[in-house]
Image: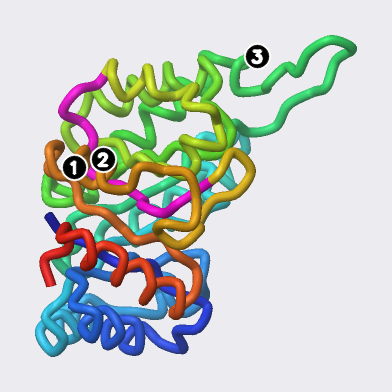
Amino acid sequence: MHFGMPFLLENDSVEEAAKLAAELKLDFVELNMSFPICQAEHISSRQLLDLQQEYGIYFTFHLDEEMAPCTFSPAIRHAWHQVAREAITLAREAHVPTVNLHWLRGVYVTLPHTRDFLFNRYREEYMSNTLEFRALCEDASQGQVRVCVENTETPWEPFQTDSIDLLLESPVFGLTLDVGHEKVAAYRDDYFYMKHPGRLNHMHLHDATPRQCHMPLGAGELDIVSLVRKADAAGARAVLEIKTVAALRDSVRYLQERGIYHA
C-alpha cells in the first residue's frame, strides 16, 4: 500500500515537501489547501506534474477545512463551490487521485435542553445544496478524481450522515477514515463505515488517546499495525498525518521496524 505525508508548517514550499517525501521514500504528499501556498490559484498542474516526475511521488489534496458547500447564503455557497471546482479540476489535470474534505455540521441554536442545527431545521434546502455540490464534483472530476469525506473528532449528526449517503450514491465519492478522530469520538461513527463497505479509500494515520490526536506512531493507544492492515485490505492509501518533521521521521521508522513499510 501507499504511504504519504501531510504538508507541514515546516515546509516552505510544495517542492520542499515533495523533496522530504522522496527522502523518506514516501509515495505522496497531501497538500492542505488551508495553507496559502497550497491553494489552487498558487499552484499549477504543470508544477505538480514536474515535481511528481522529479521526485518520484504524487499528490493528494485536502480542501480548506472551513469549506461549507451547503451553506444557505447563495453568494457564500457559490464561492465555496468555485473553490472546490478549481481544486478538483486541478487534481484531474495533475493526476491527483484523491481530494479530501470535512463535512461540517454548520450553525446551531442552543436551546434549554438541546442544540437545534440549522441544516437539520431547514433540511430540504440542505439536502438540495448537497445534491448541487455532488453534481459539481461529478462534473469537475470527470470520473478521474475521488472526493473523500473525512470523519472528525465530533461524531456526525444524523442529518450529516443522511447527506453523506446522498454523496455516496455517486461513484465519485468515497470515505476517509481519520483514526485519531475516530478514537476521540469514541468510535461513534464506525457504524457508518460498516454501512458502506468498499467505500473506504483514504486513511489519516496517526496515534491518539481519547483526548489527543496527531501523535507520532507508537506514542498513543492505537493498534497501528491493525489499522495499516485495515487500510491495505480496503485498497486505501494512508497519510501519516503527523505535524512535525521530527515526528514524521520517527513514525516512518516505527513502520520500518515492524516490517510494514515498503521502503
Tell me the residue that label 3 is attached to. Answer: 121
Percent position (x, y) of residue 181? 50, 41
Looking at the rendering, the stretch of residues picked out in magenta corresponds to 196-208
Circle nearer the N terminus (3, 1) = 3
Residue at 36% from the left image edge and 51% from the top image edge: 204
Identify which amino acid the numbered label 2 is placed on.
Ser
Give the prevailing secondary structure in the magenta stretch.
strand
Percent position (x, y) of residue 55? 16, 86
User: Is 190 situated left or right of 103 in this image?
Assistant: left
Residue 69 visible to an observer of this rendering? no
Tell me the residue that label 2 is attached to. Answer: 226
User: Mark 1, residues whose alpha carbon is within 10 Å: few (<14), some, or many (≥20)?
Assistant: some
Residue extending farthest top: 113
Q: Are marks 2 and 3 in contact (CB under 8 Å)?
A: no
Alpha carbon separation for disc pair 3 and 1 = 40 Å
Q: Are marks 1 and 2 in contact (CB under 8 Å)?
A: yes
Q: Are marks 3 and 1 in contact (CB under 8 Å)?
A: no
User: Is 68 situated left or right of 7 in this image?
Assistant: right
Residue 249 visible to an observer of this rendering? yes
Foreground: 253 or 52? 253
Q: Looking at the image, is 90 positioned above or below residue 207? A: below
Identify which amino acid the numbered label 1 is placed on.
Arg
Percent position (x, y) of residue 221? 48, 44
Residue 216 sits in quarter: bottom left
Q: Looking at the image, is 16 positioned above or below residue 227? A: below
User: Mark 2, residues whose alpha carbon is within 10 Å: few (<14), some, or many (≥20)?
Assistant: few
Alpha carbon separation for disc pair 2 and 3 = 40 Å
Q: Which mark is residue 229?
A: 1
Residue at 41% from the left image edge and 57% from the top image edge: 218
